[in-house]
Each structure stands twice: as C-alpha cells, then as structure tokens.
Amino acid sequence: MRQTTKVRALVSVLAVLVLLGSSAAGCGLVSDQTKQGAKNKVESKAQQTKQGAKKKVEAKKHQAKEKVNTKKHQAKKNAKGY
C-alpha cells in the first residue's frame, strides 16, 4: 500500500512537471514568433526608408542635371549674342 502511494505521488509530480514544461515551451514559441514578427517589421521599414532615400537622391540628381543643362544653354545663348 505504501509503495502505491509513492508511485502515485511520483507520477503526479511527473505529470505536473510535464504540463508546466509544455506550457513554458509554448510561451517560448509565442515569444519567438513575436520576435520574428518584430524583426520582419523592422526590416520592412528599413527597406522602405532606404528606397525613399534612394528616390530622393535620384530626384535631386535629376534636378541638378536639369539646372546644369539650363545654365549651359544660357551660356551658349549669351556667347552667340556677343
């Protein structure tokens, strides 16, 4: 009778440990999923920012080229006038 009680107690403790371990592992998975989601969000935002900066640089480059071309045409026009 005493051994049965010990076995039941050990089985109960083992069952509790298994249940706690599996619930803790589940929390870890959710945490990993959250981390991965945050990482993806940050990477996406970084890529959007990079593309936005690249577009601004291209626009400024285009403006500068237009300005240079306008100055060239004015200089040629002024040179022909003299």
Image (cartoon, helix red, strand yellow):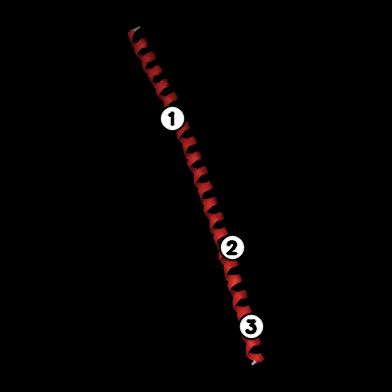
Rendered view: 78 above or below 16: below
Where residue 2 sits: x, y (%)? 33, 8
Rendered view: 36 above or below 18: below
Q: If you read the primary sequence from the N terminus, does the residue marked by circle 1 or circle 3 appear first?
A: 1
Where residue 5 sits: x, y (%)? 36, 10
Dot 2 amino acid type: Lys
Dot 1 amino acid type: Ala
Dot 3 amino acid type: Gln
Q: Are marks 1 and 3 in contact (CB under 8 Å)?
A: no
| Structural crowding at the residue carrying mark 3, measured as other residues with C-alpha within 10 Å and reported as few (<14), some (14–19) or many (≥20) | few
Q: Image check: 7 left or right of 39?
A: left
Q: Quarter holding the C terminus?
A: bottom right
Residue at image location 62% in from the left, 74% down from the top: 66
Closer mark to the observer between disc 1 and disc 3: 3
Q: Secondary structure at mark 1?
A: helix
Q: CA distance from mark 2 to mark 1?
A: 47 Å
Q: If you read the primary sequence from the N terminus, does the residue marked by circle 3 or circle 2 appear first?
A: 2
Q: Secondary structure at mark 3?
A: helix
Q: CA distance from mark 3 to mark 2?
A: 29 Å
Q: Nearer the viewer, residue 56 or 74?
A: 74
Q: State the residue position of label 3.
A: 74
Closer mark to the observer between disc 2 and disc 1: 2
**Residue farthest to the front, as pictured:** 82
